[in-house]
Every structure is written in C-alpha cells, then in structure tokens.
Amino acid sequence: MTGLRMAAPLMALREGHSPAAVGLLLALFALSQVFLALPAGRFTDRHGMRRPVRLAVIVAVLGNALAAAWPLFPVLCLAALLTGAASGLTVIALQRHVGRMAQDASELRQVFSWLAIGPSISNFLGPFLSGLLIDASGFRAAYLMLALLPLFTWFAVGGVQEHARVEIPEGHRRGSSWDLLHDRAFRHLLLINWMLASCWDVHTFVVPVIGHERGLSATVIGSILGAFAIAATAIRVVMPWVSDHLREGRVIGSAMVATALLFGLYPLVHTAWLMGALSVLLGLALGSVQPMVMSTLHQITPHHRHGEALGLRSMAINGSSVVMPLLFGSAGVVVGTAGVFWAVGSVVGLGARLAWRMSAGHHPSRGH
C-alpha cells in the first residue's frame, strides 16, 4: 500500500492531473478503511487470522495488477480503494491475533512494540522499491512488483497457529459494534488515539508548508520528515526491552504533554537543524504511543470483541486521515500554519489529563 500510495499520485501528477485530483486519490486509501473497518473487525472475530489475511492478499494483488494492466487514473483510484481495504483488513487481523498471544499487560506492551516496527519499515521500503523501479523500468514495472509482494504474505501466514475461537459469554448478546462506546474507558482511549493520530497528520501536512515559507529545499524538508520517521521507528525498536518498566497511561500522558510543547515551539524556529531536532523529539514522543494504545485496548475490551474494537479504532484513525488534511488546509488560510500547530498542540496538551487518569490494568474485561 505504501508503495502504491507514492507511485500512483506521482504518475497522476506527471500525466497532468490537478493537485485536487491527487488529493482525492490519496484520500481513497484511507476511505475504504473507514467503511470496511467494522465489518473487517467482526470478520476477524469470527474467522481468526489466516482467512482474512489471505482474502486481503487476493484483493491487494488484484488492485495492483489492475494498475499494472491499465495505468489510467480511474483504475488507479480503484487500486487505491482495494489496496487500502486489504491493508486495513490485514492490520486488524494481525493486531487481534498478536494481542491474544500475550498472557499479561507486560507481554501486550512487548508484542505491540514489536508489531509497530512493521509499518515503520513499510513506510520506507514500499516507496523506496517503487521509486527504484519507476526510474529503472517505468510505472507498470513498479505496479507489477507491488502486485507480487503480497504473495509472500500468503505463504507466511500458512504456518500461523490459530487461536481457539472465543465463545460469547452467557448474558452477552452480540449487539452493535457501537455498543463498545458505552464503555467510558474505551471512549477516552479512542479520543486520545484520535488526538495523537491528528498530530501525525498535522506534522506531515504542515511541515512542508512551514519549510516552504522558510525557503528550505525539498531535500531538506524531506530530511526533516525522514528524521521524524526514523525516530518513531527507533523508539519502537527499544520499547520491547523496556516494556516491563512502562505503564500505558504514563507513557501516553507524557507523550501528549511533550507533543503539546513541541508543537508550541515548532512555528518559532527558523533554521533547518532546529526543525530537524524538534522533528526527532516529536518522532520519539508519538512513536511510543501506538504500542501503549494497543495494549490498553486489549485490556479494556472483551476477548470476543477485540476485532470490533480494533475496527472502531481503525475507522476513527482513517476518518481522521481523510478529514483532517482538508480541515488543516482551511484553518491554515484563516489562522496561519503557526495557528494550526498551536491549536492542535493545545487540544492534545489538555487531553493529557485523560491519559494520566487511565488505569488499564484494573479493568475486568481482560482474562484468559
């Protein structure tokens, strides 16, 4: 998905499509995940990991193969929808499966720290391999490579030992997925996750704008964003070894306070190296959050509804990725890019109170 998300917009721009058309194309990667997240969650609750992942492989191969066969803008839009949906289904199935492997809160933090490294590698490897093939052999070769890549997943998932199906406890009716929002702790966790996901979006969106205003080159701006990604990966690599000493609420609350302070400073710095330093610190703060959020989510939701809970989380995050860039763009015109940073930073700073109060280990939902 990350490879296609880089290659398809680049092809559209080279063929003369407008930035608005490219924005639509990018939104489609997240849009399919918004609408399919809840059905995907329920599907994984029923079928475990292998069947959903293999279905996702078929969809991903189909999407990229169509782009390779007919590299036209409408086909690229369809490929974006298909690969976005496949990626979303795979992530939910994998997160649910891995969460059920852990025996306690410490193991949950550990396994989700390991799992969070995967997307960080993907964010580098997909665009890098696609770029090499585009320059060497053209866009069709890149799409063909991306169509073959998911087949490795088909074989990798073959050896996975499925967990025993979780039976719905007596007195628990299936109900609607939205019933999960009746749980106050789950609502607070979704709100916190949405705030922090918005911080990723605002950083990715606003840094190029501020960099352009400061007269920085595209290479320097790319390096600043790259430093953020490397720092986010680095902290996730370290976390499995220190997970025994971490508590979810404290890590998330500290990350939110740090993010608020860094967002306050960002518009005030004018040199590339200072922006790079802030980007690294922000990457360390935001990179530490996802394993803690995932660990908490698995502790506060019933076993038989983990897939649904993950689906709701995915829907919230991908909905944010569709809506927030549009909102940031509109707000930037009114209050300026500095105002966007300060407004989002203030909301996240105030929201840290929710994280400090969070005590995931004392919820009765978890238990084997």
Image (tube, rainbow, N blue to C red):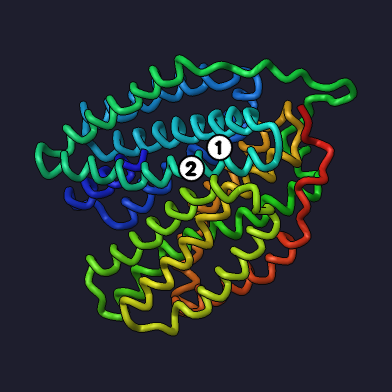
Is 100 displayed left or right of 236 in the figure?
right
Question: Can residue 124 be seen at all in this image of the molecule?
Answer: yes
The 10 Å Cα crowd at callout 2, few under 14, some 14 to 19, many 20 or more, is many
- At which x and y percent is residue 251? 64, 58
Q: Is residue 46 above or below residue 277?
A: above
- At which x and y percent is residue 358? 76, 55
Circle 2 residue: 31
Circle 1 residue: 35
Give SS at disc 1.
helix
The 10 Å Cα crowd at callout 1, few under 14, some 14 to 19, many 20 or more, is some
Residue found 39% across the figure and 24% down from its top:
153
- At which x and y percent is residue 150? 35, 26
Residue found 30% across the figure and 57% down from its top:
19
Q: Are marks 1 and 2 in contact (CB under 8 Å)?
A: yes
Q: Residue furthest left?
A: 136
Pick the quarter of the image with the C terminus.
Answer: top right
Is 60 displayed left or right of 32 in the figure?
left
Give SS at disc 2.
helix
